[in-house]
Image (spheres, grey):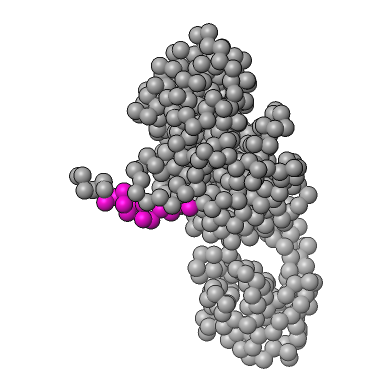
């Protein structure tokens, strides 16, 4: 977008002497420094042209570039091409800054006036959107850095990332939005470090960009209706997206805040063992995002969230977890077994649920703590060799990231059930499901001595520093490092030192152990077995 300069802008133009005409031979180029800027000056057949000498891609000198007869400037390092008359990038990447010139007698003068704020802001946002659509990591980083240098609100890029993506998530929320909430926490904790703050913004935006890369929009109904919590939950259970979306729109229209929606969202998230616990985790993250970014993001975030609820798998309906409903009905029937983490060691799904029910006469916070430690012990005893096995059924595709969910779900369960205590039975029984699902992939040995730390706070700080320079190619891995570390840090505040030590040790083992993501041979084996039975 362009806009006309106001008279005040014209009056404040910053003209500087650039070069003498005698110094510019025909079809030559000169590098000139003016007011701290490096300017490349070209004497073309069509007249003198000037631009930033630093290529906007990676900063290589354009004075060493090649200029075609039709005034197309090529940066010879990566073959980026620019129209020297306009600054347009022929490949659709970063634009090149060009400058107005005037010949005054035998001298060339240059106008290095900065464009008005709104014009620069708009140009950066337009370029950022283009980079977002291309999932261009480095370019996204540069554009966000330009926006920060301009003095704009850095969180604008997060609001825009949500705006550009929420209708492109076919099945609703992904880890990208959840991760954004956690990156904001690290951003706030590093407010005096510009480099680390930029990491948090770039990681947030690029994860969203990756998750919607080349996706079309999947529109939501525009209808609105009055929000009624009970009806809302029933409509989610019936997978009636149109009614659920209309209720969110209507509630926002009527002035409801996130706290008005949250009880029903929490209840709906725990109606089932939804998407292996992701639904409840996402509720907590939605609240944090809306608190940090403002109500302007509430509608898109909540509409995408309830779509995730609609499409979420309901694991309590499959044979492995089918006893969930029966065990939930038995909850609290004078069951007085003392909750201890050892009760769940190496117990499968059904036995894990029965053990939780056996403890259900105790305060839920006590059962919670025991199940939290049980899931942390699973992290410490995960059989890493499971990653190398080839001839396993699809149900055996369990790895590190699955194990971390036991802790991140627990963290969300504590937060939501502290506000809505009536939901403790569902949350605790689902924590038992996590334990039971993962227990079959653990060893008899507990690797506590190998991974424990004398200084828990220091160890956590070290691991979070690594998150800020994680080196992971996949966003799904880096976001699990981030969210698990923050969940553990949050949880150890409520634990005795010996229990906190187990959580931090499990987290450390996760960070330090090999993580195999692509199972090429296992996939081939499973595919051949599958099609052989068709």
Q: Quadrant of residue 499?
A: top right
The residue nearer to you, when weighing 165 against 457, is: 457
Residue 256 visible to the viewer: no
In magenta stretch: residue 255: no
- The magenta region covers 516-528
Q: Is residue 68 above or below residue 304?
A: below
Where residue 258 appears, as percent x and y from the top left, is: 59, 26
Left or right: 92 as drawn, with respect to 53: left
Furthest residue toward top: 334
The residue nearer to you, when weighing 144 against 409, is: 409
**Quadrant where the image shows the C terminus:** top left
Q: Is residue 286 above or below residue 235?
A: below
Q: Residue at x 74, y 65 (%)?
A: 113
Q: Residue at x 75, y 86 (%)?
A: 20
Q: Quadrant of residue 483?
A: top right
Residue 380 visible to the viewer: yes
**Quadrant where the image shows the N terminus:** bottom right
Furthest residue toward front: 444
Where residue 533 appears, as percent x and y from the top left, is: 21, 44
The residue nearer to you, when weighing 282 against 100, is: 282
The residue nearer to you, when weighing 154 against 341, is: 341
Q: Is residue 349 above or below residue 474?
A: above
Q: Residue at x 63, y 60 (%)?
A: 142
Where residue 224 appears, as percent x and y from the top left, is: 46, 25
Q: Is residue 145 above or below residue 409?
A: below
Q: Residue at x 53, y 56 (%)?
A: 473
Q: Quadrant of residue 73?
A: bottom right
The main secondary structure of the magenta stretch is: helix
Total labels drawn: 0
Where residue 327 appears, as percent x and y from the top left, is: 44, 17
């Amino acid at each position: 977008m362009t806009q006309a300069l106001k008279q005040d802008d014209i009056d404040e133009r910053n003209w500087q002497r650039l070069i003498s005409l005698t110094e510019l031979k025909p079809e030559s180029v000169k590098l000139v420094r003016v007011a701290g800027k490096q300017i490349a000056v070209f004497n073309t057949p069509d007249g003198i042209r000037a631009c930033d000498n630093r290529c906007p891609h990676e900063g290589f000198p354009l004075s060493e570039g090649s200029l075609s007869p039709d005034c197309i400037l090529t940066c010879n390092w990566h073959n980026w091409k620019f129209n020297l008359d306009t600054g347009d990038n022929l490949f659709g990447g970063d634009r090149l800054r060009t400058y107005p010139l005037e010949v005054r007698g035998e001298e060339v003068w240059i106008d290095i006036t900065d464009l008005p704020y709104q014009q620069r802001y708009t140009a950066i946002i337009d370029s950022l959107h283009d980079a977002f659509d291309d999932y261009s990591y480095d370019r996204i980083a540069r554009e966000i850095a330009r926006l920060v240098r301009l003095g704009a609100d850095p969180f604008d890029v997060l609001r825009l990332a949500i705006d550009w993506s929420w209708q492109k998530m076919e099945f609703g929320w992904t880890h990208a939005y959840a991760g954004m909430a956690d990156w904001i926490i690290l951003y706030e904790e590093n407010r005096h470090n510009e480099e680390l703050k930029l990491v948090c913004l770039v990681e947030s935006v690029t994860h969203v960009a990756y998750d919607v890369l080349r996706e079309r929009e999947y529109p939501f109904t525009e209808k609105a209706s009055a929000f009624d919590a009970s009806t809302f939950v029933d409509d989610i259970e019936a997978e009636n997206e149109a009614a659920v979306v209309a209720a969110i729109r209507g509630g926002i229209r009527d002035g409801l805040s996130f706290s008005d929606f949250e009880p029903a969202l929490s209840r709906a998230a725990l109606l089932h063992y939804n998407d292996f616990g992701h639904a409840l985790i996402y509720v907590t993250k939605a609240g944090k995002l809306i608190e940090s970014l403002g109500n302007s993001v509430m509608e898109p975030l909540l509409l995408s969230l309830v779509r995730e609820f609609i499409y979420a798998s309901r694991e309590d309906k499959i044979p492995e977890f089918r006893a969930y409903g029966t065990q939930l009905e038995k909850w609290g029937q004078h069951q007085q077994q003392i909750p201890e983490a050892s009760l769940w060691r190496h117990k499968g799904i059904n036995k894990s649920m029965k053990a939780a029910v056996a403890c259900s006469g105790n305060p839920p916070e006590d059962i919670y703590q025991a199940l939290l430690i049980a899931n942390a012990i699973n992290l410490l005893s995960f059989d890493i060799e499971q990653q190398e096995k080839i001839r396993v059924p699809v149900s055996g595709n369990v790895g590190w990231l699955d194990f971390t969910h036991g802790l991140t779900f627990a963290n969300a369960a504590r937060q939501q059930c502290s506000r809505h205590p009536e939901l403790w039975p569902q949350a605790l029984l689902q924590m038992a499901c996590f334990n039971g699902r993962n227990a079959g992939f653990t060893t008899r040995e507990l690797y506590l001595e190998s991974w424990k730390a004398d200084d828990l706070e220091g160890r956590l700080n070290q691991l979070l520093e690594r998150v800020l320079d994680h080196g992971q190619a996949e966003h799904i891995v880096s976001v699990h490092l981030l969210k698990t570390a923050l969940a553990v840090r949050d949880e150890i505040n409520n634990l005795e030192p010996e229990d906190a030590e187990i959580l931090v040790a499990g987290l450390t083992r996760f960070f330090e152990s090999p993580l195999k993501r692509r199972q090429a041979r296992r996939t081939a084996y499973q595919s051949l077995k599958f099609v052989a039975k068709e």
